[in-house]
Image (spheres, rainbow, N blue to C red):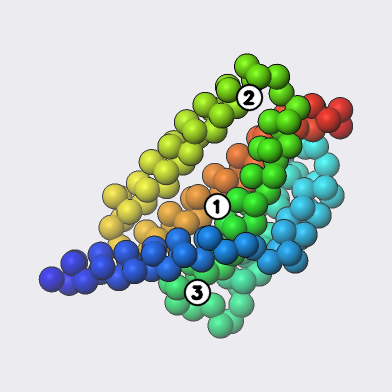
C-alpha cells in the first residue's frame, strides 16, 4: 500500500512538471545561459560549465528544501535548454542540404529515445521519490550537452 501511494505521489509530481514544461522559460534564465555559452567561446569543456547555471543558485537557496522545490529548480533550467535546443536545431537545419536535414532529424529522434531510456532508468533503479529529481537532472544535463553538441556544427556552418 505504501509503495502504491509513493508511486502515485511521483506520478502527480511528474504530471505537474510536465505541465510546467509546456510553459516558456523566463527571458533572464535564457539570457544567463546564452551569455555563459558566448563567454565560454567554442571550447566544449568551457561551455559545459554553463550546465546548472540557472538551477544551481535556486538549489542553493535556503528555502529550497523539498523534492518539489528541487524539481522546480531543475525544471526551470530544463525549459531554457529545451528552448535553446529548438533554436539551435532550427538554425542548423537551415544551413543543411536536404540529405543532411533527413540525417539530422533521424539523429535527433534517436537521441531523444536514448535520453528518455537513459533518464527513465533512475526510476527503474531507485524507485523512490528521489528518482524524480535525478531523472529531471539527467534530462537537463542530456539536453544541455545535446545543445553544445549541435552548437559545434552550427558554429562550423556559420563560419565561427
CB under 8 Å between discs 2 and 1: no
Q: Is residue 97 above or below residue 53?
A: above
Residue at mark 3 to residue at mark 2: CA–CA distance = 39 Å
Q: Tell which of 76 and 52 is nearer to you.
A: 76
Please identify, in this view, whether the residue under mark 2 or under mark 1 is nearer the observer: 2
Report the side of 140 relative to 10 (left or right). right
Residue 48 seen in the current view: no
Q: Does residue 56 sit above or below 125 in this rendering? A: below
State the image coordinates of residue 38 (x, y, percent, origin top left): 82, 47
Secondary-structure class at tag 1: helix
The image quadrant where one finds the C terminus is: top right
In this rendering, is residue 53 above or below 62?
above
Cβ–Cβ under 8 Å for marks 3 and 2: no
Residue 13 visible to the viewer: yes
Tell me the residue at 62%/71% (across/down). 58
Give the quadrant of residue 63: bottom right
Circle on res. 101: 2
Q: Which residue is mark 1?
A: 140
Can you identify the residue that label 3 sits on? 69
Query: What residue sits 47% from the left and 65% below the top?
Result: 19
The crowd level at tag 1 (other Cα within 10 Å; few <14, some 14-19, many 20+) is: many
Q: Nearer the viewer, mark 3 or mark 2?
A: 2
Q: Nearer the viewer, residue 139 or 84?
A: 84
- Position of 152 compared to 25: left or right? right
Give the residue at the far right of this rendering.
159
> Horizontal and vertical percent for residue 151?
72, 36
Q: Nearer the N terminus, badge 2 or badge 1?
A: 2
Residue lying furthest top? 99
Q: Position of residue 71 (x, y in %)?
A: 48, 67
- Mark carried by residue 19: none
Compute the Cα span from label 2 to label 1. Answer: 25 Å
Amino acid at each position: 500500500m505504501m509503495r502504491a501511494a509513493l508511486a502515485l505521489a511521483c506520478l502527480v509530481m511528474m504530471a505537474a512538471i510536465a505541465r510546467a514544461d509546456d510553459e516558456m522559460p523566463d527571458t533572464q534564465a535564457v539570457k544567463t545561459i546564452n551569455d555563459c555559452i558566448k563567454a565560454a567561446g567554442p571550447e566544449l569543456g568551457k561551455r559545459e560549465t554553463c550546465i546548472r547555471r540557472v538551477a544551481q543558485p535556486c538549489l542553493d537557496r535556503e528555502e529550497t528544501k523539498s523534492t518539489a522545490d528541487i524539481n522546480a529548480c531543475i525544471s526551470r533550467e530544463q525549459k531554457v535548454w529545451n528552448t535553446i535546443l529548438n533554436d539551435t536545431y532550427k538554425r542548423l537545419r537551415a544551413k543543411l542540404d536536404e540529405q543532411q536535414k533527413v540525417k539530422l532529424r533521424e539523429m535527433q529522434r534517436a537521441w531523444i529515445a536514448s535520453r528518455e531510456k537513459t533518464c527513465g532508468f533512475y526510476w527503474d533503479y531507485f524507485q523512490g521519490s528521489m528518482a524524480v529529481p535525478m531523472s529531471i537532472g539527467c534530462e537537463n544535463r542530456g539536453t544541455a550537452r545535446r545543445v553544445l553538441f549541435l552548437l559545434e556544427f552550427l558554429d562550423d556552418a556559420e563560419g565561427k
